[in-house]
Amino acid sequence: MKIIGLIIVVVTGALLIYAAADFPAWSDPASPASTYLSPHFIEKTMEETSVPNIVTAVLADYRGFDTMFETTVIFSAGVVCFFLLRISRREEEEPETRYYRHVLTGVTIQLKEGYKIPPSDDFERIDAAWTPPDLIIKTGCRILIPFVQLFALYVIAHGHHSPGGGFQGGVILGASIILLAISHDLRTAVRRMSEKLMAILCAVGVFIYAGTGALCLLLKLNFLDYSALAEVLHVDPITARSHGILIVEIGVGIAVMATMIWIYNNVSSAGRYRQGL
Amino acid sequence: MDIMNIIVCVLLFSGLFFLTGGAVGILRFPDFYSRLHPAGKLDTLGSLLAMTAFALFNLHHFSMGALLTSLKILLIVVFIFLASPTATHGIVDAGVRAGLAPWTKGEKRR
């Protein structure tokens, strides 16, 4: 089996190298891409979409299909991580002794099997590998996380004018929650952003993107042709393209954020959602 | 050669001095904890001074846009000042919890 795999890899590599010879020379001004495609984007992006950042316009409008399936790839990465790693509650053996910590006094209680604790906010469930979160790190992260999230929203919303957009902003948003999980513990982060919410948000992000495309189809234009949104948004078709880009960027941001947190939760706790990195 | 240029040069070169010291310290110190000492302190101070120099240099041709950019650079300074020592503390904390004993005099360098 290994030899067959090796042969396939070598043959594919050889084909790719053979095909690379047909590429136009590096930065050749006469190549097809730079004779009419690039000049069109450089000269016409502003009048066609009213987006100053050409990269954003190309990414979310001119080749919106590609970006939509990139978002889908990220969604499937999260789902695959979930299916491979997550150990479901039924299969998982509940440990014989469980630990609870009284938050106000810091007293740890050990419970044997069969005993329960009255439902109350004063007790938090902890694991045998639990270590008290450090005060300096906790405070430092608590100060930083709001600014990180604010910056992430800025990156998403300002993608029209400066480098940024849904992918980058989504990653920063996800990193802020991961920072919370690192500085406090995984249970704290999961309490804020539960697993179910992550799964739903992951799908909602892709749905916003594909739904915007389908809405354009319903409004009698091509899939992902945002100028169809002009009727809904009450603006002219060019501004509608600019707004359409913002809508799909928000979708991408939501999907990327949820997937980042979902993958981190599954990988860091080996699918058990307990401590134990 | 006005006074602003001199201040910017002094800040920039002192920043570079501390950054170089930090790099030498990371290479020369004998163990994990002592290597984190220059990494945490000198890098913070070095980038702090250098960033302040950039913010001042940017104000050379004064305008509202330049002032805004300088304020953004100063914000970077504030966040480095918060984040870098916290991160160093976190790494040291993880080392202590993992049970790594500090280096003592006479031991081999590791």
Image (cartoon, helix red, strand yellow):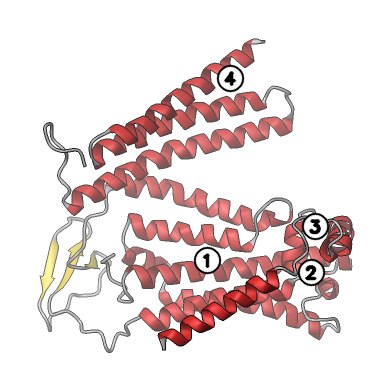
Percent of width and height locating residue B76? 53, 38
The tag earlier along the polypeptide, 2 or 1, is 2
Q: Residue B8 carries which label?
A: 4
Residue at disc 4, secondary structure: helix
Percent of width and height locating residue A121? 28, 66
Which amino acid type is shown beneath numbered disc 3? Val
- In this view, the residue in front, A177 or A24, is A24
Tell me if mark 1 has few (under 14), some (14-19) or many (20+) residues whose alpha carbon lies within 10 angstroms of its own.
Answer: many
- Please report, as a chain letter, where disc 3 is located: A
- For the residues labelled 2 and 1, say whether their Cβ atoms are less than 8 Å apart: no
- What residue appears at the point 17 percent right and 48 percent down from the top-left corner? B100
Relative placement, left or right, of A193 versus B71 is left
Quarter of the image with the N terminus of chain A is bottom left
CA distance separating discs 2 and 4: 45 Å
- Please report, as a chain letter, where disc 4 is located: B
Residue at disc 2, secondary structure: helix
Tell me if mark 4 has few (under 14), some (14-19) or many (20+) residues whose alpha carbon lies within 10 angstroms of its own.
Answer: some
Q: Is residue A118 above or below residue B21?
A: below
Percent of width and height locating residue A83? 41, 83
CA distance separating discs 3 and 1: 24 Å
